[in-house]
Amino acid sequence: MGSYSYPGNTRVLVTVQDQQVSFRFDMTIEVIIAEKGEDGGILDRKYFLLPESSAEELCNIIQNEKVHEVICGGIKDEYYQYLVWKKVAVFCNIIGPVEKCLDAWGRGVLVDDTIFR
Amino acid sequence: MGDEMDSALIDGLFPSPVSLNTVLDEIPRGVLLVDIRGRIVFMNRALSAMTGYDVSETRGLSCFNIVRSSICSGQCPCIEEDGEALTTASVSIVTRQMQKIPVRISRVSVRNIAEEAVGFLEIVEDLRAQHKTGDEANYGWRPGHLVGVSPQIEKVFSILPMVARADSPVLITGESGTGKDVIAESIHLNSDRARGPFIKVNCAALPETLLDAELFGHQKGAFIGASESKAGRFRLANNGTILLSEVGDLPSGLQSKLLAFLDDNIVYPLGSHQGVDVNVRIVAATLQPLDRLVQQGRFRSDLLFRLSGIRLQLPPLREREGDVRLLLEHILRLVAENFSKTIGGFSEKALGILMDYHYPGNVRELKNIVEYAVSVCRSDTVTEKDLPDYVVEGAGGGDNGSGLMMPVVHPGQNSFGHANGATWEDTEKKMILEALVSARGKKSRAADVLGWGRSTLWRKMKKYGLE
């Protein structure tokens, strides 16, 4: 995705399946990386397609793309702890459409275990 | 949809109609009913305990969002057109509590009287009790991933089978990171309750009212925001085991309620006078000296006696002769495999440093150190350059006691790691302050130093007013 358009921006990775947050981090093959400005507006977004599902590869992408926060469904504790250790905030057990999640994230109101219907 | 399921009846089999909901809830396997589009109609209490989701919040959701099995993506039998035969698959699920559990899922289609498929019934069987890895044959592995050959830990391991079979309440004490939760799960998995649920509750994580509702459940309308009735963890753990971790932090009101439950095994949900019989084995764990809390009037003595049917004291890692090397090699192998790295072992110097180090955060800290080393290691051997600075500087420091960057427990301190005469709170506060100083104020690093999670450090800093 390259460098940030502004150093104060925040970058998030959302695990995706059929325009919904994918149900499991380690079974994800599609992700969106979005960037929001200080006012919460989404400034940029990129889609990534993985050749196969791999939690390790996702962790690499998160670090290489300098992602600050992750939005996902179920995630194994081991990967959660690893990401937290790498100072990546994880919103887990999120269920629902990606757009609703990104909207809530942009407004700073997204919390763990949120179910969007 | 929820009301329809709540009022669904089995009629014609018994002299009077029977609630389907109640019958399915008593089945010790997970049971899921989904409609023809794979949307959840009902899940029983056992599946609720396994997945961590309450039935009221899952109705109408696609089942893959809750069950999260490894065949949900692409090979889901529920999206096949023809659902005649019983389909069975051994897969894994990821729970709300981030656990990966091996399960066997059996699925059959549900048809109406006109033989039209209207949905599916799934049975989800927890295979953890049967699931053993090849590692168990090596390195002194035990079920529940217990590693160690030292006489101190062998003493604990040797009585575990008897403890598991006894069905009495168990109280596990030991410093942070010594493996209290792992031992508790091992007890469950080796007990006659292994096929039942294993439910863990952190008594320090919630304020009293919420913890009450979480443990004992609540009725719809019991308090503002209680829009649905909730079963509570004790009922979810029916026919299984409940782990009350950090039980020393249980508020006094709930201590009385827990004591009452231990007397009659009846749960009274908030807002209800009608009790529910529950068959649960209680395992409690704490790093706090409960005897001292009793003396201080902060923990009920009668509850302590009831909980400590069997008491297990886990030794700190520094007292487990020979286990550090075993754990280092074992965890290195696991972590390297997870990180997809080929690392054969430790250099002589790195091993010397790691063997000399005192591990105040016990096995959890050792694991964190190995993870750090594997992460930064760029060759096939972990050298001293790959180790965190505080480990290199702190190794062997316990002998002279000078220049320590780590809170190290010295001889003369008791098994809970506090110096004679000082309270546990004083010692813990001092440990936190020393860790923060050594980490130059960085909380995440201080948490690593202490071998705690960041949330644990945050909670304890809040408790001691160190924010």
Image (spheres, coloured by chain):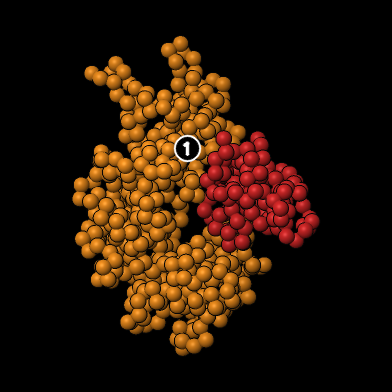
Chain colours: A red, B orange
Left or right of A56? Residue B331 is left
In this view, B320 is above or below A106: below
- Tag 1 subunit: B
- Please tell me whether mark 1 sits on a helix, a strand or a loop: helix
Residue beneath the point at 29% across and 56% down: B253
* Residue ID at (73%, 48%): A42
Asked if residue B417 is positioned above or below residue B31 in the image, the reply reads below
Circle 1 Cα neighbour tier, 10 Å, few/some/many (<14 / 14–19 / ≥20): few
Percent across and percent down for residue B340 are 62, 57
* One can see residue B238 in this view: no
Residue type (three-letter) at the residue carrying disc 1 = Glu
Task: Quickly name the residue at label 1.
Answer: B57
Residue B317 in the image: x percent, y percent? 41, 71
**Horizontal relation, residue B274 to residue B228: left or right:** left
Given residues B204 and B131, the one toward you in this image is: B204
Q: Nearer the viewer, residue B171 or B395?
A: B171
Q: Is residue A87 left or right of residue B67?
A: right
Q: How many marks?
A: 1
- Residue placed most toward the observer, B389 or B235: B235
From the viewer's perspective, is residue B408 above or below residue B111? below
Which of the 4 image quarters holds residue A87? bottom right
Quarter of the image holding residue B178? bottom left
The residue sitting at 44% across, 71% down in the picture is B464
Residue B302 lies, in percent from the top left, at 21, 60
Is residue B18 visible in this depiction of the protein? yes
Residue visible at 59% across and 53% down in the picture: A90
